Amino acid sequence: MEPKIITESDALTSAGPWRTIILTGLLAGTLDAVAAIVVSQASPAAVFRFIASGAFGAGQAFSGGDVMIIWGVFFHYIIAFSWTVLFFFLYPAWPLLRKNKYITGLLYGIFVWIIMNRVVIPLSEIAQRPFNLKGALTGMSILMVAIGLPISILTHRYYTRRGIV
């Protein structure tokens, strides 16, 4: 009996979707973090402390030492992975998402912005700021490009290569 040679394709298929989800979540989270750092012109530490302030409040997040930066990174990537998982599992079930991966990605970025800014952030410890159209359009654009497009494109590629959709 000859041993079976496992190809890269077999390894990817047997691993299920999780490899793609993890890599997509890492890419989207990293693109979003870099964009936030560049646009805000703040240090990475300040950006991740701000994210941590959503759970711990500004006082603790900005005076809590380096552990708050780690918490911020953790929360940031958990959020990116959550958006990735949601889209990844909705994609085969909702045919509308498969019409055009680019438009779908841009619209998903807008959806993410709406939920983050109208639901998640108001429920967090982050101080509420007055609405600013320029800031909203900038934030929405970042999420469209850094979150929506990569998630849509890589999810489409995963399902297309496997002939699932």
Image: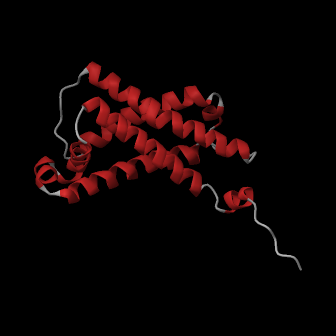
Which is nearer the eye, 92 or 109? 109
Q: Quadrant of residue 46?
A: top left
Residue drawn at point x = 23 percent, y = 52 percent: 55
Q: Position of residue 22 (x, y in %)?
A: 51, 53
Quadrant in the picture for the N terminus: bottom right
Whether residue 117 is visible, yes or no, is: no
Q: Residue at x 52, y 33 (%)?
A: 149
Q: Could you tell me which residue is drawn at 58 percent across and 56 percent down? A: 19
Residue at the far top: name it: 133
Left or right: residue 18 compared with residue 31: right
Residue ID at (76%, 45%)? 163
Residue 27 horizontal side relative to residue 90, left or right: left
Residue 122 image position (x, y, % from top left): 24, 40
Of 139 and 32, nearer the camera is: 32
Q: Is residue 102 left or right of residue 109?
A: right
**x and y percentages locating residue 68 in the rendered image:** 21, 55
Image quadrant holding the C terminus, namely top right
Report the front residue among 10 and 86.
10
- Would residue 146 be visible to someone looking at this image? yes
Q: How many marks?
A: 0
Residue situated furthest right in the rendering: 1
